[in-house]
Every structure is written in C-alpha cells, then in structure tokens.
Image (tube, coloured by chain):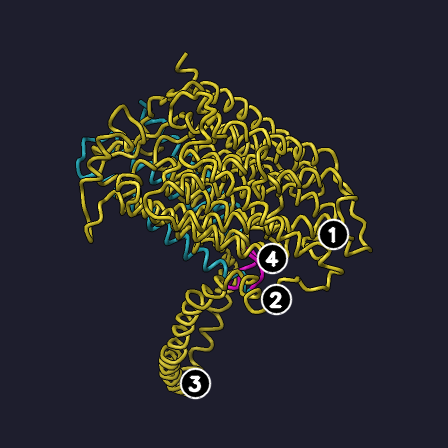
Chain colours: A yellow, B cyan
Amino acid sequence: MAENFHLLLWCVPLLPLLAGGIIALLPDAHGRIASKLAIGALSLSCLLALGALVCVLSPGKVHVPAPLTWFTFGDVTLKVGLLLDPLSAGMAAMVTFVALWIFIYSLGYMEKEKRFGRFFGFLSLFCGAMLMVVLSNSLLLLFMAWELVGLASYLLIGFYYEKPSAAAAAQKAFITTRVGDMAFFLGMIWLYGHSGTLLFYDGGNGLLESGALSSLAGATTIGGLTVSAAASLLLLVGAMGKSGQVPLHTWLPDAMEGPTPVSALIHAATMVAAGVFLVARTHPIFSLGGDAGIALTATAWVGAITALYAALVAMAQYDIKRILAYSTVSQLGFMMIALGTGGVAAAMFHLIAHGFFKALLFLSAGSVIHGCHEEQDIRKMGGLRKAMPRTFIAYAIGMMALSGFPFVFSGFWSKEAILHSAELWPGGKGPFLIAACAALLTAFYMTRQALLVFFGKSRSPETHPHESPAVMIVPLFVLAAGAVLLSFIGTPLWPWFEKWVHGEKVVFHAGAFGEHGAVGLLILSLVIVSVGVGASVAVYRNALASSETPDPLSTKLGGLWKFLENAMGFDAFYQKAIINPLAFFAGGIDMLERMFFVPLMGLAEGLIKGCGRITRASDEAGLNKGFDGVCDGLRERATSTSRSQSGRPQGYLRTIGLGVTVLLVLYFWLSAG
Amino acid sequence: MTPLATLLTLSSMLFTLGLFAVLTRRNAILILVGIELMLNAANINFIAFWRYGPPDPQLAGPMFVMFSIAIAAAEAAVGLAIILMVFRHTRSTDLDKLDSLHG
C-alpha cells in the first residue's frame, strides 16, 4: 500500500515531464495532439496531487518515502527523494489546479499560433519541474528542478524569438536569475560540507532535523557569523533571484514579452513562487539565529523594500501587463516580509491565494488584450465594461482580491495575516509600517488600472473590442471562485490553514478577534483599502479624456513620475555599472589587439614577403627554366591525382572508415586462419 | 547488476550512431553533436572498465571521464565559435559547400 502510494507521488511531477518529453518528439503539425497530451497528463497529476492533499489533511501527518540512492562515488552517497507535508501538498495542489486552468485557457488564447504544440510542451516541462521543486525532499533535487524551471521560463519568455525584445528578455531572465542561482549553489555546498547530507528529512539525519541544525548553529565562520546564518543568506539571494526581489527583480517586468498564459503561469503559480517556497522550506535553518537574527531580518527587509518599491513603480506604468508584473514583485515582497517575521503559514497562505487571484488577473488581462486586438496600453482602452462584461466581472473579483477588499476575498485575509505577523515581530516595526504603506498603494494602483481599462468612455473608438470565447472565460470564473472561497480557510475565526501548516488541530474560536490587537489590525486593513481605493477614484474618475491626455499624477509629480515610470532607473544603472564596463573592457582588448598584435603580424608578414621576393628573384633567374619542364609533367599527373582531394572532410572520413573496416576484417580473418 | 557486455553494447551503439551522424550529416552543428556522442561513448567505456576491472582506489576511470567532459565542453565552445564564424562568412552551415580546399 505504502509502496504504491509513493509510486503515485512520484507520478505527480513525472507525468507532466513525460508529456513534455513526448511532445518534444512530435512534429509541430501535431499541435492538437500535443495540447491534449499536456492537459491529460496535468489533469491526472492534479487528481493525484489533490489525493495527496487529502492524505495529509489530518494534523501532524507527514509522508517521507524512503529516499532512493542516486549514485555512490567513493564513500559519498547521494540520495534523492520526495516529501509530502502540508507545505508541499498545498503547493502541489495549487500549482496543478491553477496550471490546469491556464492550460485550458491557452487552448483559446494560442489558437492561431503556428508553434502551438511546442508551447504546450514547454508548459508541461515548466509544470513538471515546478512540481519537482515543491515535492522534493532533497536540496539537490530541488536545485536541479529549480534550474529546469529556469530553463523552461527562458524558453517560454523567448517563445516569440523572432521578436528581438522577447529574445533579449529571455536572456535577461536567464542571466539575472543565474546570479541568484550561483548563491543558492554555494549555500547548498556549504550546507552539505557541514552536515554531510542534502536530504531535508531522513529519520533524524536530515538537514532540517535537530542533529544537523544544532551543528549548523554551533559552527561559526568569518566575522562571527554562524554557518547557518551565512548559508541562509546565500539561499536568500537565490530566492531573491527567482522571486524577483530588489535588486534582482529587473527580469520580471521584461518577462511580460512571453505569451500572456505564460505570464500567468510564471507570475502566479510557478517560477516566482519557487523562491518564497525555498525560504519557507528551509525556514528551520533561517530561524536558527532567533526571531530577529541576521537571516530573518535580512529576509524581512528585502521583502519590505521590494514590496514598497514595486508598488510605487506600478503606480506609474501604462502597460496592463507591466502593472500586474510590478504588483507581483510587490506581493512577493509581502510574502518575504511574512517569512522574515516568522509567519510561514501567512506567507504560504498569501502565496496560494495570490496564485489564484494573480493567475485570474493575468488571464483577464489576456482576455482584454485578445479582445482589443493585441493592445496593451491602458491609455488606449476605457469603457470595456460594456463590451466585455464577463471579463469585467472576473477582473473585478481578481482586482478586489489583490487590493484586499474586506471579508469575502482571500487577499484581505492573507494580507491581514502578514500584517499581523509583521506587527508582532520582535525585530522592529519597520517592515510592518512599510507593508501597510505598500498595501495602501496596492489598492491605489489596482483601482487606477480598473478605472482606466473598464470605466469611462472608450479612448480608441475606431477599434471594436469583443468578448473572448468560452474556453477562455470558463477558466476565469473557476479561478475567481477559488480566489473567493480560499478566504474561508484563513480567517482569524477559523485559522485552519495556519494550524494545518504547523500540524495542529483547529478549533472554531469566536474570541480570536480580541487577541493580540486583531480588531485594531482589521480596522487598519479596512482603512488602508478604503483610503487607497478612494484616493484612486478621486484622481482617476473620468481623468483621461483621450489617449493623449497625460496622467493627472504625472503633471503633479513631474520628475518624480518619470523616475517611477522608468522603474527608478535600475535597468539604466545595470547598463552603466555592469554592461558598459564589460563592453569597455572588451573594447580595450580589441584596441590592444589592433595596436599591438596587428602591427606585429604586419612586421612578420613583411619579413616573410621580403624573403619570398629574394627567393623568387633567384628562382626566376636560375632555376626556373630547367624546372619548368619537370613541373609541367608533374602538374599534369598532380591534377589527375588531386581530383580525389575533394575538400570535403566527410569524404576523407568515409575513406578512413572504409580503410579501418577493411583492416579489421583482414586482421580477424588472418588471426582466425 | 548490469553485465559489462550491455554497457559495451550501449557504448558501441552510441559510437556508431555518432559516427553515422558525422559521416552523413551536412549540417556542421549536427556533426558536432555526433562528435559529442562519440566522445561520450568513450566515456561510458572508461567508466564501465573501471567499474568491472580490479578495485581502483585512485578512481582513474572517473578522473579520465572528468577531464574528457571538461575537454569536450571546451571543444564544443571552440567548435561552435568556428561554426559561427563560418556561418558569418558563407551564410550557411552546410559543410558540402565549404570545399574551397579542394584540389
């Protein structure tokens, strides 16, 4: 029974990977079969993941299948395995469920794409790798799947590789996350060097179990830092790269060059969640230094800076997908705050809720873009409420969940949980105050976007927007239902999710609002949302008369607005600080070659030429005539011989191969006789 | 345990496959791929004979393979760079067209 169960668990990540592999072998013409294969494999793995979720529903239940030995090298044995606990089961169920609906949506969105099948192959690879990240019981397996996720995202962002901007965005994503991956890799090696294992749980010998943890906390390294703190900081840098935290966030907005379902998949359920998940998974190592130790403080502040930064930048964007991208960066910052302040359950709750409503928002944005004939500039939209009523409803639900509208939207409760954990943090009130500001800005910019896209009058009357087909609308409503229903498992009244992650039993607790200032926080959340939405409505109601009208805030803020619009100049800074010096260095080497090697070569050339002239003169005078006759004869014979010298190496190689074969046959024949 | 013969069969199949690619393909990149296949066939042999030979605490087999993998990586980088330059010159990676060394 247990054996079969573990086999099924392996199937969860392997089915989509297998589907991706098979699709890679199918010709492009068989796109329909490829899409069916991908969706079939993912729905099976979704069913299995939901089954696995049911298996760990009762509190404190964890399955650790016996790890498999991957290879033995000398006396080093590396093992890999899977792990099923509330953290991984919840994530796996969310990833498969959200991804399944994104797949179905893609059937409609990518319908006219000529590389339809290839798209589904990449999507499958992406999902399989992500599930492996989530379910892995070994840091090594997690790292390998993590790199696969990076590869798949590179392929998907660069899906329209004929477009130079898409190709550049794909490279940028790959290289930027690689900076983080390097740190992750170093951290992993360091942990391995100290504990001799990379398995998380291994019957007492695992990395996250008491034996290894106490040895990590005891050892110190440069500057009195404990090994655990140093390794967690390295892991944090890895997570920052994947989860788009400042300063490694620049790839994430550019990743919008990919098709919209990819943006939904990368920014909602999978890739960016991997970083947050990594920190949540290795949280025992992070928290070895105490609740306000270096590692957790760094995590909280990175999250806080990112949350505020991205929310500010999102206010000044015009591209519908870019606004959502920056909002993703900001929400990931919220999750990091929660992790840094000890609220692992709050972070995971926000991650899962965010997975639903951000996928919903991106898919609605895709539906808007589809309906407006590939227009992405919100200044040229407006009044779409009437033309696309269903998309509007779905979008409104997602937008309200993200801004944290009270009581029936998951975003409200998850954000409240994060604020709660930040407020109780012993390391200071900074992250809490910043998170509150960022939450206000979130409500502000999401309302701005909704007003500019769906309300008012259409600002490009010559286009005729149309509603999207049912295959794209149904996934929207399923995800919208998820975004609403999820709110009921994380309220302070019945904090099922939080208790479940910590392996405790949940009780209905009517007095919960009275504890730890929960009522005050609730009121604060309400105030934040209403101020954000109210301010936005006051500024943007009927603000844009035509697509040429400048944004009302841009006239007031002037230079500051430009600064925000350019994302605070990170890209320009990297261009100046990293790319330009490298280009300068390369130019210098080029110069060196031109100035030094080229004249040297010229000198040698002149010398050889001079020798040649002297020889030639003596040749022509003395030897020529006598040799001419001989040469002519030789040339005639040589011409006939040189015909076999075709200039094609493969021909020579074939002859050599033939010769070797003949020699071998001869050898065996002689030695046999 | 897998018998030695199976591993040798695998490696000779891989080698033949690579050789076939090198002999028949016209695209320089695919020929490079063929060469890599042949290299890796040799690597499999190294590991196989090390594994089934007398005990060897010096790990000579895997060490050879490590070097050979490193060299293969360098070789692939140089090879691709050459192909790139050839492509810039001739706008083609078809080796049959690059016969300016013929007699």
Question: Could you say where residue B74 lies in the image, as x and y percent from the top left?
Answer: 37, 54
- Between circles 2 and 3, the one closer to the viewer is 2
Question: Could you say where residue A476 lies in the image, as x and y percent from the top left?
Answer: 66, 35
Question: Could you say where residue A4 lies in the image, as x and y percent from the top left?
Answer: 43, 15
Residue at image mark 1: A382
Give the mark, 1 or 2, whose residue is nearer the N terminus.
Answer: 1
Mark 1 vs mark 3: same chain?
A: yes
User: Does the magenta-highlighted stretch encompass residue B92?
Assistant: yes
Q: Is A255 located above or below residue A201 in the figure?
A: below
- Identified by mark 4, the residue type is Gln
Nearest the viewer among A564 and A272 is A564
Quadrant where the image shows the C terminus of chain A: top left
Q: Look at the numbered disc 2 and give the secondary structure of its residue.
A: helix
Nearest the viewer among A286 and B1 is A286
Residue at image mark 4: A317
In space, the residues marked 1 and 2 are separated at their CA atoms by 22 Å
What label does residue A620 carry, if any? 3
Q: Look at the numbered disc 4 and give the secondary structure of its residue.
A: loop
Give the mark, 3 or 4, whose residue is nearer the N terminus.
Answer: 4
In space, the residues marked 1 and 3 are separated at their CA atoms by 87 Å
Instruction: Please say if the residues under marks 1 and 3 sit with CB atoms less than 8 Å apart.
Output: no
Q: Name the subunit of mark 4.
A: A
Q: Look at the numbered disc 1 and give the secondary structure of its residue.
A: loop
* Numbered range of the magenta stretch: B90-103
Instruction: Please say if the residues under marks 3 and 4 sit with CB atoms less than 8 Å apart.
Output: no
In space, the residues marked 2 and 3 are separated at their CA atoms by 87 Å
Q: Is A481 located above or below residue A547 in the figure?
A: above
